[in-house]
Amino acid sequence: MKPLLQRLYREWFKPLALIILISAPLRSAVVDWNWVPSGSMKPTIVEGDLVLVNKLAYDLKVPFTTRHLAEWSAPARGDIVVFFSPENGTRLVKRVIGLPGDTIELRRNILFINGVAQTYATQDAASYARDIFEDPHPIVAVESIGATDHLVLALPGRRALRSFAPCTVPVGTYFMMGDSRDNSRDSRFFGPVPRKKIVGRASGVIVSFDTQRFLLPRFQRIAHPLAYDGT
């Protein structure tokens, strides 16, 4: 029995422990992934997506902490980021809408940044209907915020917060919103997000499983980029 345990330790437990010792700090400080359980970022990200998170996009952190060792960049308007909610600590995926010092306002789902209305181009929602279940008549549009174009979704049949008065984003914080504007709990409800709570930037979908169809793989979303390409 003892030789068997020694063999198991040498051939299985020891290599596994080494893998964990190497991979855990890397996942904590370098690269990570995040399952998306909700539709708050539709149609850019859908339920069942596993997104890749670049934790070195903005800074280097002490593994297993939020303490910054170095910072070389800052989240840009339009970035999709993973962060810890200031409301309850849950990890969320949202888009950066307001930078420190910006004034953000929403009027009937039209976004105003520093007093300027952002531009919108309505899209044919039929091509996205397979992954939209919340409303029989969704509205999909391309929102242009600065140099970034991205898709947004409106669900007219839902009760939602579609307007709020101008608010200034405090220094050291960022205003986050989901792309599914009528189905997202974001900075409209819990306020701007402190910089230290941002985990990293989401860069693409690794794999995806259809939560409405028995977790069947969505092959078309494997290695799918999150940046809008105009189609």
Image (tube, helix red, strand yellow):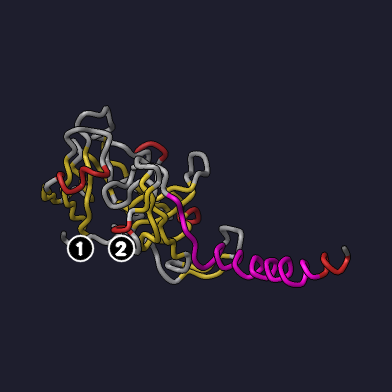
Q: Residues within 10 Å of mark 2 (few under 14, many from 20)?
A: some
The local secondary structure at tag 1 comes to loop
- The residue that label 2 is drawn on is 225
Does residue 115 sit above or below 165 in this rendering? below
Task: Give percent across and percent down for residue 144.
Answer: 18, 55
Query: From where the camera sits, is residue 177 visible?
Result: no
Residue at figure coordinates x 55%, y 64% from the top left: 27
The quadrant in which residue 138 appears is: top left
Q: Depth check: 196 or 177 in front?
A: 177
Residue type pointed to by label 1: Asp
Return the residue found at the far right. 2
Instruction: Determine the CA span between mark 2 and mark 1.
Output: 9 Å
Residue at figure coordinates x 35%, y 48% from the top left: 176
Q: Quadrant of the C terminus?
A: bottom left
The local secondary structure at tag 2 comes to strand
In this picture, which residue range is highlighted in magenta? 7-35
Q: Residues within 10 Å of mark 1 (few under 14, many from 20)?
A: few
Task: Give percent across and percent down for residue 37.
Answer: 42, 44
Marks 2,1: beta carbons within 8 A: yes
The quadrant in which residue 187 appears is: top left
- The residue that label 1 is drawn on is 229
Residue at figure coordinates x 23%, y 50% from the top left: 113
Q: Is residue 48 left or right of residue 88?
A: left
Task: Give percent across and percent down for residue 52.
Answer: 42, 61
Indicate whether residue 15 is drawn in magenta. Answer: yes
